[in-house]
Structure formats: structure tokens, C-alpha cells
Amino acid sequence: MHRFCNANILLFLSMEIIKRSEKRDSIVSTARTLFWRFGFRKVSIDEICAKSGVSKMTFYRHFPNKTELAKYILKNLIDKSMKEFREIMNSDCSTDERMNRIIRLKLEGVKEISKEFIEDVYTNNNSEIQQFMLQKTEEAWVGFIQEFRNAQDRGVFRKGFKPELLLALSRQMINLLEDKSIMDMYSSPQELIMELTTLTAYGIAPEKE
């Protein structure tokens, strides 16, 4: 009888954990969709709760506020991109195919993001979200630079280029997104980001013999 009770308690706890995980996933998925479409500032916690079908009490059990939720989503996005980037860099494929996959990876990361969200993250100066994104991007670039150096040693990329230059260029992207004369030449921030990615990718290709 004692063992039966313990088994029931464990089953109940397991079901509660699964339910909490499902609700958390629903909050995250809904918030990401709304942030990507309307931007961070325009989306409210009430709207996230209504769309995900959870109460505000449930929301606050998982996240203390909307900013921490956005940070969680952005961190997962960066971690996922870094994992996929490492897989591409260590794959057994030609340099052209590797560069094409890097460009497609970047495209997948930005294609659904609205102009409003990009502006909220990158051009809302000194906001908590911007500072968080800059910090996480800097941390990720340490890994990116090491992967580029390793690839240079294998002859995948041109040996003469300095991977640190890519980091410097990524920092300048914020200035470009704020430059109206530059942005007027493109239909969306995504188009500018993809052009910079394409120029960079093919600029670091190994020199032809």
C-alpha cells in the first residue's frame, strides 16, 4: 500500500511538471510569434496570456516580467544559432556549400522578424533588451571567432582575413540600421542584414589558385 501511494504521488508530480512545461512552452511560443510580428514594446503581458491561454498568475510563475521573457527567447535563439553554426563549420562540404548554408542560417534567423522588433532590439538605445542582446552577441562571437580560426587552419576560409573584423562589422550594423539614407535603399532591415551577410561570406572565401 505504501509503495502504491508513493507511485501515485510520483505520477501526480510528473504530470504537474509536464503541465507546467507545456504552459511555459505555450507562453514562450506565443510571445515569440507576437514579438516577431509586432515588436517587443507593442506587445503586452495581457495579450501574451490571452493568446497562449494562460492566466497572468501562471505567466508570473514562469517569468517575472516581459523583459525577462524576451531575454529567455533571445538567449535560446542565439544558443540555437551557435549550435547550428558549429555544425556547418565542422561539416564535410565544399566552401561554397558551407557559405551558402551560413547565409541560409542567417536568413532563417531574420526572415520572420518584423522591422519593429529589430528596431526595439537594436536601435532602442541603452534599453535593457538592447544591452542584453549586445552582451550575448559578444559572448557568442568568442565562439564564432574560434570556429573561423579553426576553419582558416583547415583552408576553408582565406587565411589573410582577421575574424575579429567580422565582430567589428557586426557592431557597425546598428549604426547602419539607424542610418535613414542607407535604410531607404532597402525594403526592410532584413534585406540589409542579408546583403551584409552575403558580402561578408563571399569576401572571406579562399583565394582561387
Image: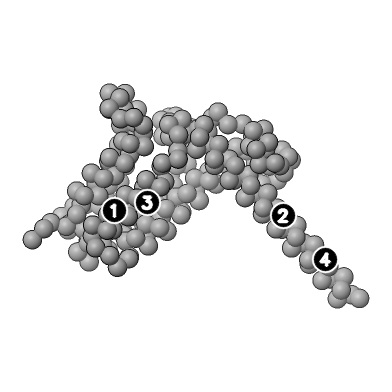
Question: Which mark sits nearer the N-terminus, 1 or 4?
Answer: 4
- Secondary structure, mark 2, is helix
Instruction: Say which residue appears at 70% left-offset and 58% top-offset.
Output: 18
Question: Which mark sits nearer the N-terminus, 1 or 3?
Answer: 1
Above or below: residue 198 compared with residue 2: above
Read off the residue under disc 4.
9
Could you tell me if the residues under marks 2 and 1 are in contact, i.e. CB atoms within 8 Å?
Answer: no
Q: Horizontal placement of 196 versus 77: left or right?
A: left
Figure quadrant of residue 4: bottom right
Disc 1 crowd, CA 10 A, few/some/many (<14, 14-19, 20+): some
Measured as percent of width and height from the top left, residue 103 is found at 31, 49
Read off the residue under disc 1.
100
Read off the residue under disc 2.
19
Disc 3 crowd, CA 10 A, few/some/many (<14, 14-19, 20+): some
Question: Which mark sits nearer the N-terminus, 2 or 1?
Answer: 2
Measured as percent of width and height from the top left, residue 80 is found at 46, 54
Read off the residue under disc 3.
105
What is the CA distance from the residue labelled 4 to the residue labelled 2? Answer: 15 Å
* Residue 176 visible in the displayed image: yes
- Secondary structure, mark 3, is helix
> What amino acid is found at the position of numbered circle 3 in the picture?
Leu
